[in-house]
Amino acid sequence: MLEKYKNWSVEHSIKHKKIVEKLSHLSDDEIIAYFDYENMKEKEVDFCPLYAQNKKCHDIENLNCYLCACPNFRVTTTKSFCNVNSKYGSSITTKDGYIHQNCSKCAIPHGSIYIKAKFSIDWKSIMKNCFSS
């Protein structure tokens, strides 16, 4: 499971970097605003497979996709979990015994205040602690 997350992280960081490079003339606040769900599903349709379905990963009004994955998410070879133990998270155990963190009810990384506090043009640097063994 760890390899699957690592592979996704590499692929996602490439997509993220391309968008941010295109926006390099904008301020940090403008870049964050660009990643608003409504804007992204219109202008960056390949960024997330849910955009094509007009579907959100989290049922929140002002969803921002800059931190598509949460910096508090952690993955090991046997489980994924929330590093801050968000009260909005839960666990799912798969058939093969892997414990998977369910973050669908957590909105922490998708608000502009949180994003501004963690902001870096380099998405990988924000996410560096997530995908270790």
Image (spheres, rainbow, N blue to C red):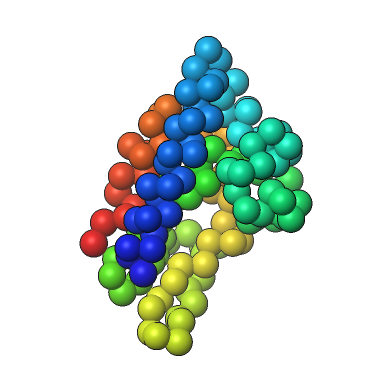
| Residue 31 found in image quarter | top right
Q: Quadrant of residue 98?
A: bottom left
Locate residue 37 relative to residue 69 in the image: left or right: right
116 left or right, relative to 57? left
Q: Residue at x 31, y 74 (%)?
A: 78
Q: Residue at x 60, y 48 (%)?
A: 48
Identity of the residue drawn at 46% across and 82% down: 94
Residue found at the far left of this picture: 133
Residue 118 seen from this side: no
Q: Nearer the viewer, residue 62 or 12?
A: 12
Task: Residue 112 in the image: state x and y as whole percent.
Answer: 58, 34
The answer to whether residue 7 is visible is yes
Q: Please tell me which residue lies in front, 36 or 5.
A: 5
Residue at point 38%, 84% (across, down): 97
Identity of the residue furthest to the bottom in this view: 95
Percent across and percent down for residue 131 are: 32, 55
- Residue 9 locus on image (x, y percent): 40, 50
Q: How many marks?
A: 0
Residue most extreme to the top: 25
The N terminus, quarter of image:
bottom left
For this view, does 92 lie left or right of residue 7?
right
Q: Is residue 125 above or below residue 104?
A: above
Question: Where does the image place residue 133, in percent across and percent down from the top left?
Answer: 23, 62
